[in-house]
Structure formats: structure tokens, C-alpha cells
Image (cartoon, grey):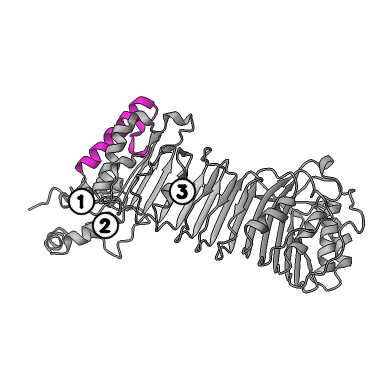
Amino acid sequence: MENRNCPAKRKRLTLSKQTDLHGLNFLSLPEGQHADFCSKTYCQDIVSRIIAGITLKEAVRMSTVCSTLRKAWIYHPNLDFDISTVPASSQHNIMQGLKRFIDTVNFVLREHSGLALNRLAVNFELHKEHANDIDGWVSFAISSKARVVVLNFSPYLGQHENNYSFPFHLFNDQNSSHLEVLRLDSVTLDPSREFCGFSNLTTLALVHVLILQDLQYFLLRCPLLEWLTIRRCPELHNLHAAEPLQRLKFLCVQDCAVHRIDLLAPNLRVFEYRGGSKVIFALSECLKLKTATVSFFIEDNLGHIFTEVPKGLPHIERLRVEMTVNTQIHGFMKAPLIFMHLRNLIMNITFGNVRRLGKNAVLQLAYLLEAAPFLVNLHVDMYCGFECGYRPKKGVVADHPHHNLKDACITGFNGNGGQVALVKYILRNAVQLKRMAVDPRRKILGQLVEEFEGRMVAESELLPHDRNGVLTILG
């Protein structure tokens, strides 16, 4: 008898290329074999494997192909809701699209089995007036023991008083232990001091979040926290904790008005910062912290790099610095503090107003060799619009032999006099130098653009000083 639900001539469902069914083409079996296959005891396991390998939308679409799979989507482990949840016909009408989105999420959660839920993610512009529905979604995630919860209510970037407030009151000692990953965007975080905590949370990401209480009370109630990301949280002025964060391995703080980062994290390995240059890093007791990226918006002088960074991050071995410089080091001849463990340094640096910088602006980077006596690899990518006629005075930076630098690279070389002096200084003082590359190209909108004058200057003024044959002009 013909199976009207799975006719052989019906158009097959095309799964995404990412779906890995390990060679199984479940829907291509002949009808008789299909029926026998479905009668086997492990059929449900196969269906579960298929459902887990596709999106929720694909699972719902699959349910229209065969009656065997009609209710399979209610066991989908990952519930992701975003703008694509709303039909295209409703996306142009804001109020209609918003209502359709909320109704769709409520319907799916009402029909879902709540079994084996891995992730609940909501990516849609929602505010505090939608709190009743959102609280219900979070309650569903709690009762379903979801491992991952994502509440991303951007692109809302308005006033924080319209933020949805994360419902800490829904959690208690019995139901909070299942959450392992929490990502919040455009919400308010206001945990009380009585908050039970998330005993198994390993990853926390806060983006454009209004933090009303001292964040340390929340962090200290997450004893297994390993990854912490905080971005665009304007009310965060100090990141500190009175007790060690024993499991923390990765810390990222970006675009916040933070003045001080003071943590004791014995297992912290990677640190990333982007923001104002007057921040104080107090991570000297993080002995395993070996890799850091530091990006400053506008740095009035390079002195901060040579003083505060080695003081606050003394154990760093790999450092990346991104900054804009508008002046030169205050007290240019003053010796900087020392990076005792730094081995690899990458600098992306833009030099600003030439009138404020003076002739010694680029050459001041020569202090890197003195500041990092054990540096092995150096890469400086710079942009400066100075005229080639600017030449630093001779002897403005005294020679200081460096015994460990082996590889150096300078990109964005346009023949500026300071760049020429810097390359000559490195060639003259790096006694163990094996390779040095000068690239007269720079990236503009992702494309490499040749600096023809830089190439001519490099060939005429640098190659004659390459006594050891280590210099290469790239491009």
C-alpha cells in the first residue's frame, strides 16, 4: 500500500552541508526498507542523531516530509530564535514582527518536550516590557536543565532604563547547577548579595550590560568560571574580587570605563583589554598569565606602555599592543621599566599629529629593545604620515646592545626619517639578529598598498647598513 506520508516521488529534503549523518541517508531508503528500519529498536536514536545535526527550522521542515518524524523536532537540543524566526512578510512591520516572534517562541517552548535541552538562545530586540514572556523562557530553560542560555537583545543600544533585568529570582540552590554558559547582551544585571550563584558556570559573557551591583559578588559565586568577557559595560569602573578566582583562564575587558583591573587568578593564561590608556593593571600575582593583547584608544605618550604594562603584567611572554600615539615619551631619555619575560611582541601603532610628535616620535620605539632584554621576535606595523625629510638627531637614543632578538619585521615603511633611524638602530644593536624584514606596503581597507617612496628609501639608505646580510625588502 502506498505510503502517502513518504511518497518516493516527493521532493527530498535537502539538509545543510554542515550536517554529518555519517553516511546515513535516512529518507532515501525504499519504502519497505524504510518501514523495517523504523521498526528497529534503535530508530529513535537515529532520529535523535539526525535532529541534533540540523537546525530547529530544518527539523520542523523535516517533520512535514514523513509522519515518522512529525514530532521529532520537539526533542531538538538547541533552540535558537532570531530574526529568521519571523516570516519575511512580518519583518517590515515592527509591532507585527515583534508579536509574531514572541508568539512563535512561546508556541515552540509550549510544544517542546523539555528533554535533553542543550541551548536556549534568543537574539532579538526586546525590552523590559517583555519581561513576562522572557521570564517564562528562562523558566523553561531552568526546568529543562539547559547548559547554555543566550539572551541577546541587541541591536537595542538605547537608554539602559529600558533594559530587561536578568531574573536572578528564578534560580535557587536546586535548579542553578545545570547552567554552564551564560551570554547576556543589552540587559541589566542586578544580583542580590543573597544570590545562590551558578555552581557549574564556566563561561560568562556580558555585552552592553548595565551592572548595578559590585560584580565581584556575582563572580565569587561562580567557582568554576573559566572564561569571562565584558564589553561595552559603561558602569563598570573597577573589576576586582576580594578572593581568588581559582579556575579563571581567559579574561577579556573591552570598551568599558574601567579604571582598575585587580584580580588574583592563579590559572589565568590569556588577557585582552581595549579601552582608555589610564587603566591600572594589577595582575602581577597571576603567575601563569603569559599572553596579552592591549589596545588603547588614544595614548598621549608611549610612557604608559613602558611603565604601567610591565608593572601590571610582569609575567607576559607574548604581547600584542594596538595604539594611537599623539606625542612622544615624556622624559625621552628616561630608562623604562623592564619586561623580564617578554619573548614575542607585536605592535600596531598609528602616529598622529606630526606637529605634536616632533622628529623623535618613531625612533622612541627603539626603547623596546631596552625594555625587553629577552625579546626574540618583534613585529611593528605602523602608519605615519610624516614627510621623509624629518630626521632624528644623531645620538638621541644611545646604542644599547641586545643579545636575544633574532627576528624583526617593520611593515608600513614609507621612508620616514624616524623609521629609517629605527631600522638602523636595530641592525646596529641586535647582535644575534638572524632575519629582518622591511615591508614598504600598508593595509588600506584590507588591501596592501605599495609605498613606492618607502621602497626607494629602504633600498638606498638601509641596504648599505646591512653588514650581516639579514635585511629583506618585502613586496
Earlier-in-chain disc, 1 versus 3:
1
Q: Are marks 1 and 2 in contact (CB under 8 Å)?
A: yes
Q: Is residue 388 left or right of residue 352?
A: right
Earlier-in-chain disc, 1 versus 2:
2
Would you say residue 449 sits in the magenta stretch?
no
Q: Secondary structure at mark 1?
A: helix
Task: Give the labeled residue for mark 1.
Answer: 72
Label ID, residue 50: 2
Q: Is residue 273 above or below residue 35?
A: above
Q: Secondary structure at mark 2?
A: helix
Q: Secondary structure at mark 3?
A: helix
Separation (CA) of disc 2 from disc 3: 42 Å
Of 261 and 451, nearer the camera is 261
CA neighbours of label 1 inside 10 A, class few (<14), some (14 to 19), many (20+) = many
Task: Give the labeled residue for mark 3.
Answer: 216
Separation (CA) of disc 1 from disc 2: 10 Å
Badge 1 amino acid: Ala
Counting from the top left corner in percent of width and height, residue 439 is at 75, 58
The answer to which quarter of the image holds residue 311 is bottom right
Label ID, residue 407: none
Please report the bounds of the magenta region as a residue range.
84-111
Counting from the top left corner in percent of width and height, residue 326 is at 76, 43
Separation (CA) of disc 1 from disc 3: 43 Å
Q: Is residue 200 above or below residue 300?
A: below
Q: Is residue 371 above or below residue 118?
A: below
The answer to which quarter of the image holds residue 367 is bottom right
Badge 3 amino acid: Gln
